Amino acid sequence: MAALLTRVKSKLFIVAHRRTWGLLDGEYASVFRGRSLDYDDLREYIPGDEIRDIDWKATARHGAPLVKRYVATRKQTVLLLVDTGRSMAAMAPSGEPKKDIAIQIAGMLGYLAVRHGDLVGLISGDGESTRMLEPAAGEANLERLLRVIDRASTLEAPPSRFSAQLHYLAEHVRRRMLIVAVTDDGGLGSDDDPLLRRLHAQHEVLWVVVADADPTRFDPRADASEVTDGSALPGAVRGGERLQAAYQQALAGRREATDQRLRRLGIARARVGGTSEVVGSMFALLERQRRRAR
């Protein structure tokens, strides 16, 4: 099997041209507050950069604003919190398995961390079990984490219950980390708010939702089934306009409820429907987190 990290980087470099990659790299570095920083190099000024970081002498020579870029002098820790239950083997709006999008998200943010010399760990699981791989450095470690996500997220896996992974995090992780939660629209339970409020106070939390495909939009000539319980929805039924409208209304309501809860808790969030959306969505997510932390 081809290395998953190689696939992540290939898609990343295809989608993100050089300037976009530089922006991503800079946004990642700015997410952590209170870092010890050493001067690294210069890059072009981007709206939102700190005025105090402008190198005025270099700007005068260059003819356009340049800001100083810094690197951390001590390692930080990124903990990927990933749903690997059965629901993540279902289809996303792009037609890809949701786990492929989760791997792209985890791989891209993990790769940014590795580039900065930071440590990356993983908590993953379903409704029956949760496991943690301790944070470590390097691409080989990140590849191992991605393979765990890939192997666990199957149609044969137990049903998802992301609150179990949230509780595991609260009980076993005491040191402050950057938490990247990756689940789907069903991952936030109705009684998870107190736990999320506690975790958000202790860590920096980014929440990424991998969107569900709309079963009413599938080819009506083929039947579809729900991965959580195997129930079937015949194509003839799915093609009905009333059903499509009702499903869209229910889906919009569920997504808005999730967004409102995360917004109320002050947790930056993103929703991704395909691997081609990952770069743009993660840049916007890091930008929101940076502005929130100022």
Image (cartoon, helix red, strand yellow):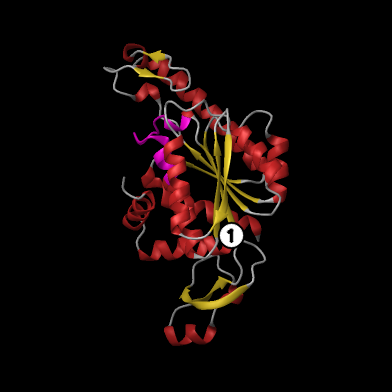
Position of residue 16 relative to residue 129, above or below, is below
Residue at (41% x, 29% y) in the render = 90
Q: Quadrant of the C terminus?
A: bottom right
Q: Nearer the viewer, residue 92 or 121?
A: 121
Give x and y (percent) for residue 53. Answer: 58, 75
Q: Residue 95 lies in magenta, yes or no? A: yes
Left/right placement of residue 219 relative to residue 55 reads left
Give residue 119's quadrant in the image: bottom right
Left/right placement of residue 255 relative to residue 143 reads right
Q: Quadrant of the N terminus?
A: top left
Q: Residues within 10 Å of mark 1 (few under 14, many from 20)?
A: many
Left/right placement of residue 248 relative to residue 134 reads left
Residue at (39% x, 65% y) in the render = 19
Give x and y (percent) for residue 170. Answer: 69, 42
Magenta stretch, residue numbers: 87-103
Left/right placement of residue 181 relative to residue 138 reads right
Kindly tell me whether residue 288 is visible in this rendering. no
Residue, disc 1:
31
Residue at (57% x, 28% y) in the render = 127
Position of residue 231 relative to residue 158, above or below, is above
